[in-house]
Image (cartoon, rainbow, N blue to C red):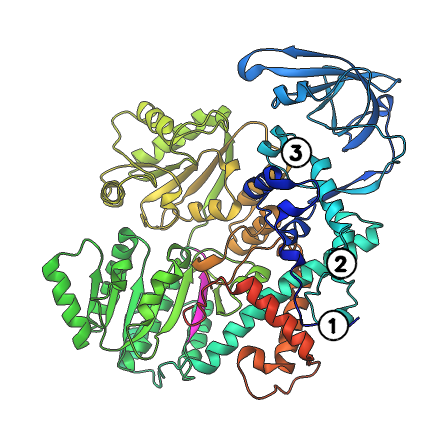
Amino acid sequence: MKNSGMRSRFEDTDIKFLKGVGETRAKLFASELNILTFRDLLNYFPFRYVDRSRFYQIREFQGEMPLLQIRGHFINFTTEGEGKAKRYRGTFTDGSMMMDVVWFSGIKTISSMYVPMKDYVLFGKPTLYKSYWQMAHPEVEPYDPDRPPSGFQGVYSLTDQTRRRGFGQRMIQKAVGNLLAMPGFANIQETLPDEIIERYRFPSLSQAYRELHNPTSPDNLRKARERMKFEELFYLELQILRYSRRRSHTLRGHVFEKIGDYFNRYYSECIPFELTGAQKRVLKEIRADMKTGRQMNRLLQGDVGSGKTMVAFMSMLMSADNGFQSCLMAPTEILAGQHYETVKEWGDKIGLNVALLTGSTRTKARREIHAGLISGDIHIIVGTHALLEEKVEFRNLGLAVIDEQHRFGVAQRAKMWAKGTIPPHVLVMTATPIPRTLAMTVYGDLEVSVIDQLPPGRKPIETWLRSDANRGEVNRHIWRQIQEGRQIYIVYPLIHENEKLNLKSLEEGLERTRQTFPGIEISFVHGKMKPAEKDYQMQKFVEGKSRIMVATTVIEVGVNVPNATVMVIENAERFGLSQLHQLRGRVGRGADRSWCILMSKEQLGGTTKKRLGIMTATSDGFLISEADLKLRGPGDMEGTQQSGIAFDLKIANLATDGQIVSAARKAAEDVLAGNPQIAGEIQDADRDNAVRLDLAGLNILACELKRRFDKKVDWSQIS
């Protein structure tokens, strides 16, 4: 099997030209499923597969049944209820027994589609309702005696709108079948070089597509899925490694040659506690980076309270010892102010000039800060996005520390690196622990340091799981803490009531909190408030003027109140584990015993109960993030908010495909070793197992990299 470097236009054909689609359905494909071309449809993979190799009978139903198909006819139809309670019911029999088929939406369309006494095939999940079997919204199609049961079949994700328009599983399966039967599909161009396909014994692209949509056996389906997962991850890893190689070879960095008076004095005379082993290890890693003459790009991970700010400060001392300035950017004015207070207190002990610049800084003070940065009199500047303004110039910016990277867009941060002829070293701090398989991919172009120890003497946060039945117990606990002078957070997932989701809203919660704790000053914040009002409410809580903070998740990052000892999270089942862990980190920041109380509904599903059980069982952020990744998937942790490489996986799963991630990364490394021109390098790397591609293979890589990543801005020069 040899590839040509020429690219076929078949895959890019508009979906409206597919048999059975046309203009109207093409618009539905585009608006609801984001399918615009033949390629989009081929890559719209089933999310699971069902066995349709036989017909069941109703009398066989028992216990918890899977999705299955039965054959029979409707006896009659009735419309019941009014308004939102309206439903359309059909009595269906297969000759052995009867069952109900019920529809709660799309009734007008459904009522005109099916007639009594005509043979149909129903495909759906039977459930037992009041001792009577029923199916809700099954797939229904006329019975064709000439078409036998079809064996394995893919089940595709559909939206409510597609279902209301009569666009069910059968419709999309038919569209895929028509596409696979087209003459042009047989000549679809390969997207992996022959050398890779042969090395890993992958099926061809056309074979993989056929098996993914119409499996002939479980083993063939497995091979097809492995090939497509590998391909997605291979190109992602290849692009990340290209970025990293290009930067390491082309971007110079300031050389911090010495550890001098600032660092040594602070380390030996001023640190009020012994650094943990993890902090010392990370400082050595940072020190080694900043001596190389290449720009440091390092991600610093560590739980809340692990000492990231101290590590960042001592890194800034290395910068000052070598005659350079540093900046620390924070996402909110509150957080920037807290960082400033901390860094200034530490810096004053050794004569460092530390300044604060935010959107609220007065004009006169702003002018003085601008002058101090240009003259070099200011050693460290702490601030928000105000640091990115064109008027802000440095004499010699050597180190940029960014707190909570996901709160800054890459395009914003790009402005910082233009403030010098040589870009500063970059240290990104995050309190969100990232599992290894995810970090390897998302942050593949950054070196990663981990502070995996907490300072001695920190008391663990007790985590309780409670429901409304325990509300009295929770309120009494809050009262006791308030009477002891402590402060309380109460967090809600929504601002306004949403009857459909049945969640506690901030507005309802605020009113209930006022009634439950009369005479207690309460702050409230949410994301839709004007910044000035939000800052006022948060500052009131920071200063202790209010005792309870009722909020949405805006307080996940950006407020440090050591006196707060209780975090109550309403509707905890609606949050991800990592977010719950972040919220829990808002308490336990002082010397007092602290609690995180997860309020949930009484009846929880198995997965939800397991998730919340993990929260009560451990406070290890890395264990929690691993569990969250496996239960929820990686989500959108990429985009221009991270390293700028597209992170849109259609079939691979970073939580469960760790081995394929590793294999794809090794393959990308081997290809770059054998073809250094891909990363703009000249010399071949001396590496075993290097894969050298012929011209056709190189053309395939070029076309795929262009197609997958060319629409994305090249942020490799940033972080």
| Residue pictured at 68% horizontal, 65% vertical | 191
- Cβ–Cβ below 8 Å for labels 1 and 2? no
The overriding secondary structure of the stretch rendered in magenta is strand
**Which residue is label 2 attached to?**
206
Q: Which mark is residue 167?
A: 3
Asked whether residue 61 is in view, the answer is: yes
The dot on residue 96 is: none
Magenta segment includes 277 = no
Q: Earlier in the sequence, mark 3 or mark 2?
A: 3
Q: Secondary structure at mark 3?
A: loop
Which one is in front, 205 or 36? 36
Q: 576 above or below 322?
A: above
> Toward which corner of the image does residue 331 lie, by quadrant?
bottom left
Look at label 3 and name its amino acid. Phe
Name the quarter where the N terminus is drawn. Answer: bottom right
Distance CA(mark 1)–CA(mark 2)? 14 Å
